[in-house]
Image: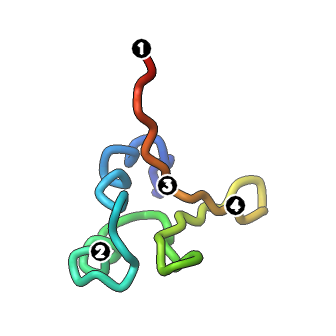
Amino acid sequence: MVQPLYDHDLTATKLIGRKVSDEVVQEDIKLWPFEVVAGSGNKPKIVVKYKDEKKDFLLKRYLPCF
C-alpha cells in the first residue's frame, strides 16, 4: 500500500536546498513511496500519480510573514 504524499511532507523537506545528485538524497529516495527526479539546476522534483495522471512538484521554502 502506498501512503499519501502528505504523510511524508516532513520527510520531503529534507530535499530543500539539496541536489538530486547528493549521496544523502540518493539513499533517501530508495525509502520513499514517491518518485524524485531532477528538475532544472538538478533541483529535486517530487512526482506523484493522481487519477491516472502524473504530477510533479518543486519544493520551495516558505518563510512565515508576520
Q: Nearer the viewer, mark 3 or mark 1?
A: 1
Q: Amino acid at mark 2?
A: Val
At a point 58% along the width and 77% down the height, the residue shown is 40
Residue 5 x %, y %: 49, 49
Distance in Å between CA atoms under marks 2 and 4? 20 Å
How crowded is the residue under tag 3: few (<14 C-alpha within 10 Å), some, or many (20+)?
some
Secondary structure category for the residue under label 2: helix
- In this image, 50 relative to 22: left or right? right
User: Callout 2: 10 Å neighbours few (<14), some, many (20+)?
Assistant: some
Q: Are marks 2 and 1 in contact (CB under 8 Å)?
A: no
- The residue singled out by tag 4 in the image is 55
Q: Kindly identify the residue that appears in the image at 43 percent across and 64 percent down.
A: 33
Residue 58 at what x, y percent from top left?
56, 59
Neighbor class of circle 1 (other Cα within 10 Å; few <14, some 14-19, many 20+) is few
- Which residue is labeled 3 in the image? 59
Image position, residue 7 (x, y; %): 40, 42
- Label drawn at residue 25: 2
Q: Amino acid at mark 1?
A: Phe
Instruction: Name the secondary structure under disc 3.
Output: loop
At horizontal 45% and vertical 21% (from top left) the residue drawn is 65
Cα separation between marks 4 and 3 = 13 Å
Left or right, residue 40 beside residue 54: left
Dividing the picture into quarters, in which one does residue 53 lie? Answer: bottom right
Residue 66, disc: 1
The answer to whether marks 2 and 4 mark residues whose Cβ atoms lie closer than 8 Å is no
56 up-or-down from 60: above or below: below
Q: Earlier in the sequence, mark 1 or mark 4?
A: 4
User: Is residue 5 or residue 20 the one in the foreground?
Assistant: 20
